[in-house]
Amino acid sequence: MAESAGTNWAGNYAYTASEILHPASVDEARRAVLRALETGGRVRAVGTRHCFNDIADTSGVLIAMTALPPRFELDEEARTVTVCGGARYGDFAEQLDARGWALPNLASLPHISVAGAISTGTHGSGSGNVSLAAAVAGLEFIDGSGELRALRRGDDDFAGAVVSLGALGLITAVTLDVVPSFEVAQTVYVDLDWDTVLSHIDELTSSAYSVSMFTDWTGVQQAWLKRVVTDDSPAAPETLLGAAQSSEKRHPLPGVDASACTDQFGEPGPWYERLPHFKLAFTPSNGEEIQSEYLVPRERAADALRALIPLGDLMRPVLQVAELRTVAADDLWLSEASGHDVLGIHFTWMRDQAAVEKVVAALEAALFPLGARPHWGKVFVDADGVVPSLYPRFDDFRALVAKYDPKGVFRNAYLERVLG
């Protein structure tokens, strides 16, 4: 009997795939693609299941890329590390640090897979920091003909292949940029009013290496500043535009135990223990939730916040918390930060799909006219089909999909909606 594919990490989406396979090698994964070609079936990669929509589902067979053997190849001269596509960032970060190297940034969760993160444009925070996808220097993937392909930064197809929505194939390995290892100290400040935030948005989001602000839309309740520290770095400022340092350890969600969160109070630690919000050994965030996110051009950040604040009463019955972060521009075709710096406006919702979709539709009506792009792996509605028009290279991406998957082996309901 075929193994059930189960649900995503948060339990809000049940996969409809007929079965899930756990290949022990790249060749075994290739054979699964070739079988689908022979039978007219479909396959799709699945990683750590942190997407909140059907992007990783299929009517055919899911391939669990997390089953592939670990890989860790550090090239100090090139300043890169190559890992298995299904590897979680937290699985190799300590090993990388032990060799004196670091990734430039991490997402709030170290639990997510590299391939899944880059394929959806997932990011950390920091006005000078690019997304996780923009740190990719090379890719290896099994395309729709069952062939193992390799692309490197500078190749003609590379900028279209990194944020790929899983449409080009099964990512078997990723080569990432690395930098010399560094330490970070995290300090939490509490209670900023909207007038202060709106008039100082650039100053706030640029006040540390990585900045996250958490809000229920009545004001900003918490600002998490992650500073790079050296032996002679000054202590964190006592106040942030009038906001005091928190006297207790904080979780982003009100009333939730903070033991799962990375260390605070300005205590320095390795980059991989401070840049995420949550520790690898703990269940991150809340678990029972739905997430959405919209990334707005940085120059429209204050306009976007002003458009959303009046919708607070609509959001709060299903909202757990919202988070504001910045990401630097890149040149990847389908990156949410492609072509301009952005403010990410992230929503953690209650697990009520119908209610969330109703609220999300109202948010999109306010944000899409400002050029906001939804996170590919989170819940969005796009009832009017606006999203493709937000990407100047979208037609080029459609052509790239036809090139690498001409028979539609990796097509699914999500791609039919997005690509047409």
Image (cartoon, rainbow, N blue to C red):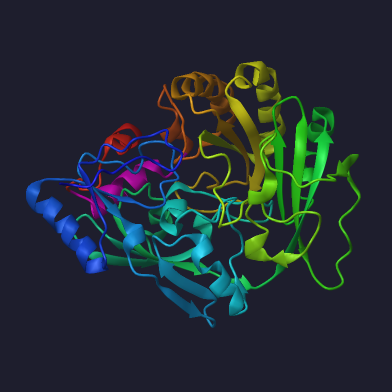
Instruction: Tell me which segment is drawn in magenta.
Output: 391-406
Could you tell me residue 153's position as x and y percent?
45, 66
- Nearer-the-camera pick, 341 or 295: 295
Residue 220 figure quarter: top right
Answer above or below: position of 335 versus 312.
Answer: below
Horizontal relation, residue 81 to residue 61: left or right: right
The residue under the point 44% across, 71% down is: 82
Q: Can residue 374 be seen in this view?
A: yes
Answer above or below: position of 237 versus 10.
Answer: below
- Indicate the quadrant containing the C terminus: top left, top right, bottom left or bottom right: top left
Answer above or below: position of 292 versus 145.
Answer: above
Residue extending furthest left? 38
Q: What secondary structure prevails in the magenta region?
A: helix
Q: Can residue 241 be seen in this view?
A: no
Horizontal relation, residue 172 to residue 332: left or right: left
The residue under the point 69% across, 46% down is: 258
Residue 302 figure quarter: top right
Residue 365 figure quarter: top right
Q: How many labels does the image show?
A: 0
Q: In the rendered structure, does residue 402 fall within the stretch colored magenta?
A: yes
Could you tell me residue 40's position as x and y percent?
10, 46
Residue extending furthest bottom? 77
Could you tell me residue 275's position as x and y percent?
65, 57
Could you tell me residue 18's position as x and y percent?
20, 41
Q: In the rendered structure, does residue 359 fall within the stretch colored magenta?
A: no
The residue under the point 60% across, 19% down is: 317
